[in-house]
């Protein structure tokens, strides 16, 4: 299966007053058609940067893309002109952000804003909305349909409201409707429920899961909450200090995490279950990305660190089918370092993956 | 129930109504019934959790306890005495005994003051400490909260979120309080640091015999840290009891929905979750009868819309306000 979106060796740096911050250190990520991938990590691990880089929303400068490719249907987004990106952004890859109020204009009604978006997509010479040309009246109709699809009650009436008349959960629904208005192939959701209450969060996650099932969008869900990601995604990639340390199916991650950081993270997060003793913690602090530790970026905090960890950077490799880990613990001294350049998607490197089975 | 342990703090039928201003653009007058008659007590040395969604009134409760805002009605008993009758100077003495730790450690510290200055301030104001004694006092406090001497002359922006939170705690501890009110103490912290902070708070509680009032919307935090929990909805406590008891077998439909809404970091996701419809109603127009009836998946009928449920007490020490259990 050809992946829909493929990030290869993406390296991003930021120029700051203190020096160059190595924000992303050559990451690999694959999103298949109809796939739901969760990108998790703590503050500053680079998950939002990755999401923004896909849509080329990073401010350049101070950001600098040092190397890498972001292939969308085989074409490198990093080589596209701004004009070409405009046709992709929002239309074929849409994004939903954390705080819905910041992305709605308080001076216009929901109707005006939704219809504007629908018509803007229509005006471009993109694929349009299922091939039909829309006039304003039809666009309003379409907007109402979208609102009812995201389960806003009485959409004919509520569409006349201003954003401040909506609650946080409803605004997030409007943004999802807006993102879905052009039937994008990929929906990127950056912490879509962080600003919401738990019961509302449950509603929104349920909605996203339902929409994905009915329309078959591919989803990249960025979150700090493993619970949120587990509820929606089939696959999870864990990030730490600008690297992807582990990437596998949701079931694999919780059943058998390999990377010491993932293990530590799973032990340290507070799960909503009966308390048994004290939760474990990961010692130390997230490294400074201006002077990241040499070798593996996790080694100063790692409980299983070895001599090689501070000297050599581990490469991400498949140690079980569909289970990719970036750690020296699972590397044979004689192994050829081929895997980092190979295809990332499930079963994409059958021959090579067999080589690594023995180290697990 | 052990009645021997003293009740450090007790609230009796506490109400706080905020009047809506009249005016050309303001529509009619009325009240925001932020806290609408709640009663509970905290025993000395315990951790009590107040949990609820935004707008349920939990922070208003905390602020009224400190008398940062005056209650509309009801009593707040501190060691048996009603603090609403205290004079301003009486309150100043009392506030030494209860300290609050805020959600966002960054905005509760002055960015232009070093850690030393921030922590020293209450010591100079309340204890009149100066010079070497002051420095020793600050060093001791920083040691208690696990900060190193080198952090003393740093500014807030040079510290991590967890460290800033610790500075806030050091400051709160400086006057040897008995009660710490922790308003969302972990929300601003990373997931891997949250447990660390709660473990630290727990060891601190033992070491300094503190009583905690936790306020949080995060059920996992409350379940981990608290002995007793009260679930709030629109200004009322709808269910209260021992934490494990409430969360392992919730009785009130709202608590059930809350518990089932918590996203679990595990591979097996529950097939069915109780999804509530709509949003929490406005506190200016509280629904008649049971205030939860507009969203309740287990509504019995007209009784829920007409009669406010009374509190039913159970043998396991928990209490519920719901017509299902009358």
Image (cartoon, coloured by chain):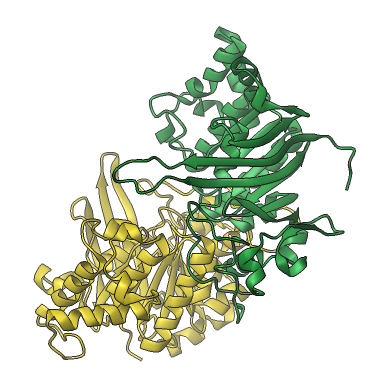
Residue B206 seen in the current view? yes
Residue in view at x 55 percent, y 26 percent: B149
Left or right of B84 in this view: B244: right
Q: Is residue B185 visible?
A: no
Q: Is residue A327 above or below residue B208?
A: below
The image shows a total of numbered marks equal to 0
Q: Tell me the quarter of the picture where residue A169 sits.
A: bottom left
Q: Nearer the viewer, residue B97 or B159?
A: B97
What is the x, y in percent for residue B217? 57, 54
The yellow chain is: A
> What residue lies at 23% left-to-right and 73% top-to-bottom?
A90
- Does A29 sit above or below residue A12? below
Say above or below: B228 vs B279.
above
Q: Position of residue B160 (x, y in %)?
A: 47, 41
Q: Nearer the viewer, residue A107 or B114?
A: A107
Q: Quarter of the image holding residue B22?
A: top left
The image quarter in which residue A23 lies:
bottom left
Rendered residue at 25%/72% (across/down): A69
B19 sits left or right of A269 in the view: left
Question: Quadrant location of the C terminus of chain B?
Answer: bottom right
Q: Position of residue A128 (x, y in %)?
A: 16, 85
The chain coloured green in the image: B
Image check: B277 left or right of B42?
A: left
Horizontally, residue B70 falls left or right of residue A311, namely right
């Amino acid at each position: 299966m050809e992946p829909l979106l493929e990030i290869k060796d993406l390296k991003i740096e930021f120029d700051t007053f203190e020096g160059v911050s190595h924000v992303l250190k050559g990451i690999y990520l694959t999103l298949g058609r109809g796939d739901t991938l969760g990108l998790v990590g703590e503050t500053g691990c680079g998950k939002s940067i990755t999401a923004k880089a896909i849509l080329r929303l990073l401010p350049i400068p101070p950001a600098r893309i040092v190397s890498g490719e972001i292939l969308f249907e085989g074409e490198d987004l990093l080589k596209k002109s701004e004009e070409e990106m405009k046709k992709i952004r929002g239309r074929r890859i849409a994004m939903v952000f954390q705080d819905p109020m910041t992305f709605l204009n308080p001076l216009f009604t929901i109707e005006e804003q939704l219809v504007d978006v629908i018509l803007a997509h229509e005006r471009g010479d993109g694929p349009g909305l299922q091939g039909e040309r829309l006039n304003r009246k039809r666009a309003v109709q379409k907007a109402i349909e979208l609102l009812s699809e995201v389960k806003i009650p009485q959409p004919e009436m509520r569409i006349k409201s201003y954003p401040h008349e909506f609650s946080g959960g409803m605004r997030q629904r409007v943004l999802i409707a807006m993102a879905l208005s052009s039937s994008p192939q990929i929906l990127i959701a950056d912490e879509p429920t962080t600003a919401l209450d738990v019961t509302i969060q449950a509603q929104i996650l349920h909605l996203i899961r339902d929409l994905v099932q009915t329309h078959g969008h591919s989803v990249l869900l960025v979150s700090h909450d493993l619970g949120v990601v587990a509820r929606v995604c089939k696959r999870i990639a864990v990030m730490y200090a600008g690297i992807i340390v582990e990437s596998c199916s949701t079931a694999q991650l919780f059943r058998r995490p390999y990377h010491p950081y993932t293990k530590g993270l799973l032990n340290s997060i507070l799960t909503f279950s009966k308390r048994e003793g004290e939760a474990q913690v990961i010692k130390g602090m997230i490294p400074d990305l201006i002077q990241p530790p040499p070798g593996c970026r996790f080694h100063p905090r790692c409980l299983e660190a070895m001599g090689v960890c501070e000297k050599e950077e581990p490469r991400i490799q498949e140690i079980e089918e569909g289970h990719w880990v970036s750690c020296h613990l699972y590397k044979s001294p004689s192994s050829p370092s081929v895997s980092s350049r190979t295809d990332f998607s499930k079963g994409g490197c059958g021959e090579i993956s067999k080589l690594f089975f023995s180290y697990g | 129930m052990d009645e021997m342990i003293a009740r450090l703090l007790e609230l009796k039928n506490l109400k706080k109504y905020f009047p809506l201003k009249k005016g050309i653009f303001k529509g009619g007058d009325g009240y925001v019934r932020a806290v609408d008659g709640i009663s509970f007590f905290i025993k000395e040395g315990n951790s009590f959790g107040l949990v609820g969604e935004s707008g349920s009134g939990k922070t208003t409760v905390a602020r009224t306890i400190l008398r940062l805002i005056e209650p509309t009605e009801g009593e707040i008993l501190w060691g048996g005495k009603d603090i609403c009758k205290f004079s301003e100077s009486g309150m100043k003495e009392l506030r030494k005994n209860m300290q609050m730790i805020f959600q966002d450690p960054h905005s509760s510290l002055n960015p232009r003051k070093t850690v030393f200055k921030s922590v020293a301030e209450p010591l100079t104001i309340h204890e009149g400490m100066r010079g070497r004694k002051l420095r020793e006092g600050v060093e001791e406090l920083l040691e208690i909260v696990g900060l190193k001497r080198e952090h003393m002359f740093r500014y807030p922006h040079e510290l991590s979120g967890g460290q800033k939170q610790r500075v806030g705690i050091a400051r709160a501890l400086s006057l040897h309080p008995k009660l710490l009110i922790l308003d969302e103490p972990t929300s601003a912290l990373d997931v891997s640091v949250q447990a660390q902070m709660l473990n630290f708070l727990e060891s601190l509680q033992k070491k300094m015999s503190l009583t905690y009032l936790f306020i949080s919307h995060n059920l996992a935090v409350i379940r981990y840290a608290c002995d007793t929990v009260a679930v709030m909805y629109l200004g009322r406590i709808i269910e209260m009891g021992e934490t494990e008891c409430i969360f392992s077998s919730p009785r009130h439909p709202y608590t059930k929905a809350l518990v089932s809404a918590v996203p679990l970091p595990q591979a097996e996701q529950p097939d069915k979750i109780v999804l509530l419809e709509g949003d929490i109603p406005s506190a200016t127009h509280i629904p008649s009868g049971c205030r939860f009836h507009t969203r309740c998946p287990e509504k019995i009928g007209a009784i829920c819309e007409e009669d406010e449920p009374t509190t039913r007490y159970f043998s396991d020490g928990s209490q519920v306000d719901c017509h299902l259990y009358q």
